[in-house]
Image: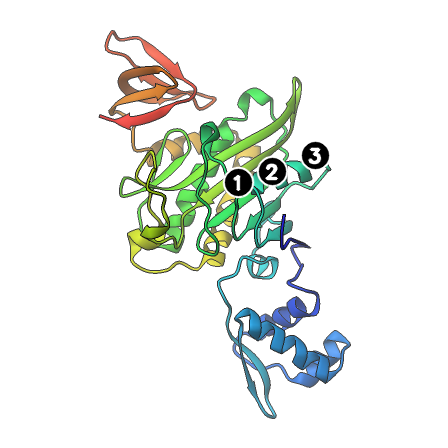
Amino acid sequence: MRGGADHSRSGSLQGFDAQILALFRQQPTGFVSGEELSRDLGISRTAVWKHIKALRELGYQIEAIPSQGYRLVAAPDLLTAAELAAGLATIRIGRRFVCFKETASTNQVAFKLAEEGAEEGTVVVAEAQHSGKGRLGRHWQSPAGVNLYCSIIIRPPILPFNAPQLTFLTAVAVARAVEQSTTLKPRIKWPNDVLVNGRKVAGLLNEMSAETEGVNFVVLGIGVNINMRREQFPADLRHPATSLFLEGGKEVGRAIFVRALLTALDGLYDLYLNGGYAAIREEWLTRCNVTGKMVSVSFHDRTMTGVVVGVDDIGALLLELPDGRVERVLAGDVTIL
C-alpha cells in the first residue's frame, strides 16, 4: 500500500491543512483573516502561510486579499478524507475514511481492517488500484485519478444466508448516486452491474466473514467509471464498458459523486436494518433491465435460456425455462436475447 492516510470523519489531509479547509467552509462566501486562522489553530501567521501554500500546491484555489484575508475559491477533484467528509451527514456510513493514492485492492485493505475490528461505516478509498478485482475473479481496470474505487465495512445483524441481499442494496445506491450527480438514467443488470445506455459503468463485489450463527462483517466493494476516457479501457473487455463522462459528455466531480453514493447507501442500509429486504428488492426490480426478457445465462461450461420472472428472497435470478419450469440461478453472466 502506498500513500495511505487514515482519518475519522472530522479527519484531515495533514492536520492543520484540513482544519484550515474546515474554517474556510464555515465561511463559504466570506474571508477568514490570517489573524483568525493563527488564533484558532494556535500557530504563527508564518505557519498559516506555509499551510496555505501547501494547499495551493495540492490544487486548492485560495484567494488572498490584503486586509480581508483568505477565501477558498475551488477545491481539486481529490478523494481525500477532508473532501469526502465535507458536508456529509450520514448516520453509519462514513464514520471513518482510509484514503490511498494507490493500493493493491480496497477490498483487501477493508477486509483486513474489519478483521482487526474496524468500526462499521469505515470507508476505504484509493485513487488507483493495481490488483483490483471484479466478480468471478476477473481483473478490474483501475487507472489513477479518474474513477472511484472504494470498499465499505458494515456489520449487519443477519444470517450468512441473507448476505447476497446486500449486493442489491449497493446496486440501488449506485444507481441513485448516478441519477443525483448526472442527467443519466442508469439500469441494473443482475446480479451486480450498473449500466448506462446498455454499457457497464459500475461493478460491485461484496466479500463476507461469517460463522454459522451470523455475519461478522461484509465488505461492500464498489467500482464506478466516472471520468475514464475511451483510450483508458482495455481492448479485451468481455462486455461493453463506459464511464459517466463518456455517456454524459462532461466531467463529474468525484467527491460530489462519492458523497451522493455514501448518503444513498446510508439511507438504504438504515431502511434494510429497520424494514428488511422487501423495499430494497422492490426498487431493485423497478431498475432492473432484464425482468420479463428472454435471456441466456452462462456459468462456466453451462448455459441456460429462459425468461426472467424475478428474483427471490436471497437475490437468486428466477428463470422460466422453455418447458415451464422455474430455475433459481445463483451466479452467471446474463445476456439479453
Disc 2 + disc 1, Cβ < 8 Å: yes
Residue 108, numbered label: 2
Q: What amino acid is found at the position of numbered circle 1 in the picture?
A: Ser
Q: Which residue is labeled 3 in the image?
A: 115
Q: Position of residue 45 (x, y in %)?
A: 72, 84
In the rendered image of this protein, does residue 268 appear above or below residue 102? Answer: above
Q: Element under label 2?
A: helix
Q: Residues within 10 Å of mark 1 (few under 14, many from 20)?
A: some
Q: Amino acid at mark 2?
A: Gln
Helix, strand or loop at disc 1?
loop
Q: Residue at x 65, y 66 (%)?
A: 18
- Pointer 1: what residue? 131
Q: From the image, state whether disc 3 or disc 2 is nearer to you.
A: 2
Residue 252 locus on image (x, y percent): 39, 58
User: Is residue 315 visible from the viewing direction of this image?
Assistant: yes
On screen, 324 above or below 220?
above
* Rendered residue at 49%/57% (across/down): 255
Disc 3 + disc 2, Cβ < 8 Å = no
- Marks 3/2: CA–CA distance: 11 Å
Residue 179 located left or right of residue 83? left
